[in-house]
Image: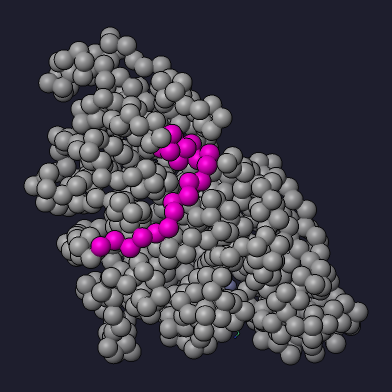
Amino acid sequence: VAMASGTALIYDEAMTRHKLLWNDPICDIEVPERLSASYEQLQCYHLVERCIPVPAREGSEEEILLVHSSEHLEAAKSTQTMNEEELKRISGNYDSFFFHPNTYHCARLAVGAALQLVDSVMSGKVCNGMALVRPPGHHSQRNAANGFCLFNNVAIAAEYAKLKYGLQRILIVDWDVHHGQGTQFIFEEDPSVLYFSWHRYEHQEFWPSLKESDYDAVGLGKGKGFNINLPWNKVGMGNSDYLAAFFHVLLPMAFEFDPELVLVSSGYDSGIGDPEGQMNATPEVFAHLTHFLMQLAHGKLCVILEGGYHLRSLSESVCMTVRTLLRDPLPQVTGEMAPCLSAIESIHNVRAAHKPYWKWLMCEDTSFLHNLSTKSDLLKTADTNSCTDDEAKITDSNETDRIERFLELHMKNIMFPVPPIKTATTAELKASADPNTFPVHLHVVREMDKNELEALVSDFHVDLVKANKSLLSLGSTLTILDKILKKEVCNGIAESPAASASVTIALRHSLRFGFQRVLCILVGDIDIIPSTEDGKILVIHVCKKEQTGESSSKHYIVLNWKEDAAGNDFFSAVLGFILPIAYSYQPNLIVIAVGPNRSLGISGISLLFCLLQGLAESRILAVIEDTDINLMQSVAKALAGVSMPHFGVHVPPTQEKVNQIKKLRNQLQQDWKMLQCSVSDGI
Ligand code: Q9C
Ligand code: ZN
């Protein structure tokens, strides 16, 4: 099936006409400029013209009633003709909400914009998209406005998608810094909607200060297990905390759930500089979060704006999201890749609370802390990581300056013009492929001839190029690597009859080029002669047991894995082990080599390519010895990003495999800190 392509963008200036008419220090951050500034920044980066414009429309009363009571609808409707005094009085009936005569119209447009986005994606007009809306929605409840929200745009979108398209599994990811308690209440008993929210909580001190926002609110009745709350008990959470939450909580659950559509309650008040969130995550982390979610539901992803009150941080983060939806290569995440102890504690707790409901968690030995509050107090003082109060609080203008400078500096690096994703391969692969299903923008390169090759490799690894035959087999690998190094292409696939030799030479060549960190993932029987001592190469070798006697060290990690014959048990290894190590390492280049006697199926291998693409600015070299055309095509599709593979149902691995991962995690988590997900082995 050909996949939809393109990214929808929905923006209507009319939604800037809802504004606060009186003084209210609680509500005065939710300003019209949030929308216009975001849109202007998108224009500035030339992202608007690359998207498919989709008009907003008013959501109908019937559509609003999918989630809200008629009393609530009528109350909202009645505000259109009120004077300021009446508006102020009725606003006072709710926690943190303000009405303007235009509010009702704007809120209907916000609902309709979300529904237009769902229609565009579900009809195949586009693959994904973003709707910039005001007022936001996720605090809004069946019968009440709350926290700047009148109608719950995302919740209505989910009900609408279920009704109109017969969907049975929808994932809502709420990365806003506040708990979308409205959305939780609406779907609490509904197993067809998996709701995930992380939020500033501070042991219930932070608004809306509900017991129901804690990690033990897992859903009710039939919906048990389908509500995931990850409370942050400290401010100052950053990129690594967010990524750890994705690796160790959200992504494994999301892959096991296998949604047909993903909706994002996309608040950017969880980003750096936001006065509400007081977190430290930089805009580029949203590119990575978006990229991970694009791997689900065949890429059907609808991003709908919620909060975000630091205009610069908000608009840069919106741009990061849209750029990623458009499939540009991802910027590197910055900062030390180590989650803080308080984050690990929260991650540990939500995993323990969800253990009964998810196969993937069942065999892990996460259990509740016996005395949580004591332990938490201990952790408060033990925590030496980034999320300490003094570093995170914006108390004076120095702090504001710091954030502005930070954003300025990082934006320079991040919004650099990057080459579009182009995949290089040699002509052979393309010729043998079905032209109807094969990536169109595959870039065919000529192989180097013997003389060119000799010139390139003459002064090093002479031993390896002695025989003519092996020399020629290096041709495609080096040609393609060279194009990646020269930034002519982003990634490439080399067929090689001698993968071991090709990889060895590719690694040496890239170190010579000046790369400081090359991540090399070997699948199957491949013997390379690497020097991993100086840390410039990190090898993860996925192979069947027996045949290697090697044991793992910091830079040579052996993962004995033979994929379950019945299906897909490699998910947990990729999400909970390989990805965290890869993000801890932050490579400049990734080489993935598939040799003979491979222990993974096509879908396991594709999963690796898809998920690791966010690293090394998408520089990935594939070296494949196998002549299986299906494997080649899957890798090509994954790298060219033309179709979102369906990874099938996530099968939990055997106890033996789980134990291996656990052992490796314990052994390696001091070196690769993103592996930490449990308090008991974290300290
Ligand atoms: N003391 C969104 O980000 N703060 N809403 C209330 C009361 C309300 C945030 C503080 C924050 C609402 C969509
Ligand atoms: Zn918020």
Mainly helix, strand or loop, the magenta region?
Answer: loop
Location of the N terminus (image quadrant) = top right
Residue drawn 21% across the image and 46% down it? 543
How many numbered circles does the render carry? 0
Write down the region rendered in magenta.
633-654
Taking 7 as reference, is 503 left or right? left
Residue found at the very far front of the displayed protein: 566
Residue drawn 80% across the image and 90% down it? 89
Residue drawn 53% across the image and 33% down it? 437
Which quadrant of the structure image shows residue 249? Answer: bottom left
- Against 216, residue 582 (above or below) is above
- Against 22, residue 552 (above or below) is above
Residue found at the very far left of the displayed protein: 549
Residue drawn 25% across the image and 45% down it? 599
Asked whether residue 387 appears in the rendered view, the answer is: no
Asked whether residue 600 appears in the rendered view, the answer is: yes
| Residue 453 part of the magenta segment | no
